[in-house]
């Protein structure tokens, strides 16, 4: 059994069948490409839950042509929820004596070398990698349809990852915080690292697994779809607050969310402009992102307590997406005006269309192999990821 554990692994994929067949097929193709150079035997285990499973409809697994993939693929029915699916896959690994497993979301695009590097360079029980949202330019090139407001919001949500900003904000991000969308983890740890809550994997996992047991590789990474609406962003943040509240740790989580102060960001903004005088738009987005994070944190803290947030401004204003803000006070005013338009009942629902996930419009992973090494888009992707 020990020999088996050393020479094989599992790539576990928690999958909500409401995401659809195109997402699942693209996910399996992306994983299959990435496993080509892995020096150990690996099979894919997809833990499926969702409306099709609950209603007894024909499962998506019956619609997958396994002959298209080199890897062996197994589908298992799990209880609802991502954490339940992750735990189910981990139990399979433990029962089969598999020592380390990959766990990954379906709707991300992985660098071609990511599985190989994680396996060879990972030295701790929980290993993650760098990550970034797809740049807007790549999404548009891949055929995604985005409105002016969506583009503006994406640039704000992801402001700290822009190549001109990333290095200056590196110190604000915990160096060993593992993003749950892709990780290599000891099987025994995988089955208990989310605690007793069932809401969200990331924040609680990084709380329960001590820093000395975590490792984030800087040599590779993955890309994910950004959020493109304020309600969707708030829904995601609220899940983390609710998960913390379920374990009586809401106050601790709230302090962590407010750990970056306006004064810190204004200093970073000035430093960026001294180095890159033309980075006015990027600095404006960073200021707006900080104001948004603080205002959303305050709202989610109230919602998790069962209270309705009281907007700081009386009426929603017309949002100017083009004029840069020059300081935090301007950013705060603009964000508060924007948040005055929020439908709080929508934020507290599982999702805008009621099927339990967010970002449902189109999340088929973008095939990054279309961008050849050294091409303009390939360089853009690597710069956002911060990988040389």
Image (cartoon, rainbow, N blue to C red):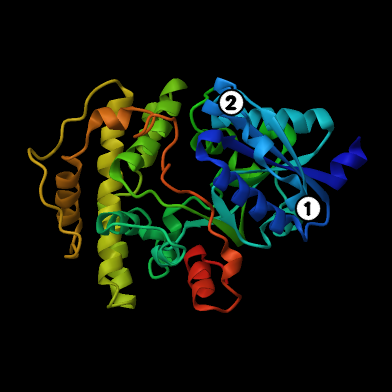
The label shown at residue 281 is none
Q: Which residue is mark 2?
A: 57
Give how far across and how far down residue 196 sits, in percent. Answer: 56, 22
Q: Is residue 93 left or right of residue 381?
A: right
Quadrant containing the C terminus in the rendered view: bottom right
Q: Residue 265: x and y, percent?
A: 30, 57
Give the vertical position of 360 relative to 371 (above or below).
above
**Residue lying farthest to the left in this orientation:** 314
Report which quarter residue 195 is drawn in: top right
Residue 262: where, in percent of width, then height?
26, 52
Between 53 and 332, which is closer to the camera in this rendering?
A: 53
Q: Quadrant of residue 279?
A: bottom left
Q: Residues within 10 Å of mark 2 (few under 14, many from 20)?
A: few
Does the image show residue 318? yes
How far apart, in angstroms, are the residues tagged by discs 1 and 2? 27 Å
Residue visible at 16% across and 31% down in the picture = 310
What residue is disc 1 on?
A: 70
Determine whether, in the image, residue 223 is placed left or right of residue 97: left
Q: Is residue 164 above or below residue 313?
A: below
In what element is the residue under mark 2? loop
**Residue 335 versus residue 38 in the image, above or below:** above
Residue at x-position 32% and y-position 70%: 272
**Quarter that holds the N terminus:** top right
Q: Residue at x 36, y 58 (%)?
A: 145
User: Would you place residue 374 above or below residue 167 in this image?
Assistant: below
From the image, state whether disc 1 or disc 2 is nearer to you. 2
- Mark 1 and mark 2 residues within 8 Å of each other at the beta carbon: no
Q: Residue 81 location in percent, x, y?
A: 54, 28
Residue 178, visible in the rendered structure? no
Going from the N terminus, do you reach mark 1 or mark 2 first?
2
């Amino acid at each position: 059994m020990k020999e088996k554990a050393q020479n094989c692994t599992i790539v576990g994929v928690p999958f909500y069948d409401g995401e659809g067949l195109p997402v699942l097929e693209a996910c399996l193709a992306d994983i299959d490409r990435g496993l080509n150079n892995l020096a150990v035997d690996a099979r894919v285990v997809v833990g499926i839950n969702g409306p099709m499973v609950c209603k007894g409809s024909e499962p998506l697994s019956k619609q997958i042509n396994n002959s298209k993939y080199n890897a062996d693929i197994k589908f298992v029915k799990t209880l609802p929820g991502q954490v339940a699916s992750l735990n189910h896959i981990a139990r399979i690994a433990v029962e089969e004596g598999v020592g380390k497993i990959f766990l990954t979301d379906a709707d991300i695009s992985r660098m071609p070398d990511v599985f190989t590097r994680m396996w060879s360079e990972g030295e701790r029980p929980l290993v993650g990698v760098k990550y970034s949202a797809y740049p807007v330019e790549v999404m548009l090139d891949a055929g995604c349809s985005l409105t002016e407001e969506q583009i503006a919001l994406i640039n704000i949500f992801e402001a700290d990852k822009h190549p001109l900003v990333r290095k200056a904000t590196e110190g604000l991000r915990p160096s060993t915080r593992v993003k749950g969308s892709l990780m290599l983890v000891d099987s025994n740890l995988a089955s208990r690292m989310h605690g007793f809550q069932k809401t969200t994997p990331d924040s609680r996992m990084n709380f329960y697994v001590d820093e000395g047991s975590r490792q984030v590789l800087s040599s590779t990474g993955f890309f994910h779809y950004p959020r493109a609406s304020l309600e969707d962003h708030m829904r995601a943040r609220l899940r983390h607050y609710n998960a913390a509240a379920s374990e009586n740790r809401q106050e601790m989580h709230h302090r962590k969310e407010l750990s970056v102060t306006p004064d810190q960001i204004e200093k970073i903004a000035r430093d960026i402009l001294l180095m890159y005088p033309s980075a006015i738009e990027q600095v404006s987005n960073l200021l707006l992102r900080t104001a948004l994070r603080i205002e959303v944190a305050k709202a989610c803290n109230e919602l998790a307590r069962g209270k309705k947030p009281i907007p700081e401004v009386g009426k929603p204003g017309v949002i100017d997406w083009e004029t840069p803000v020059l300081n935090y006070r301007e950013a705060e005013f603009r964000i508060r005006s924007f948040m005055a338009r929020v439908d709080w009942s929508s934020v507290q629902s599982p999702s805008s269309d009621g099927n339990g996930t967010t970002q449902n419009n189109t999340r088929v992973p973008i095939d990054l192999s279309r961008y050849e090494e050294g091409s303009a888009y390939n360089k853009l992707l690597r710069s956002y990821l911060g990988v040389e």
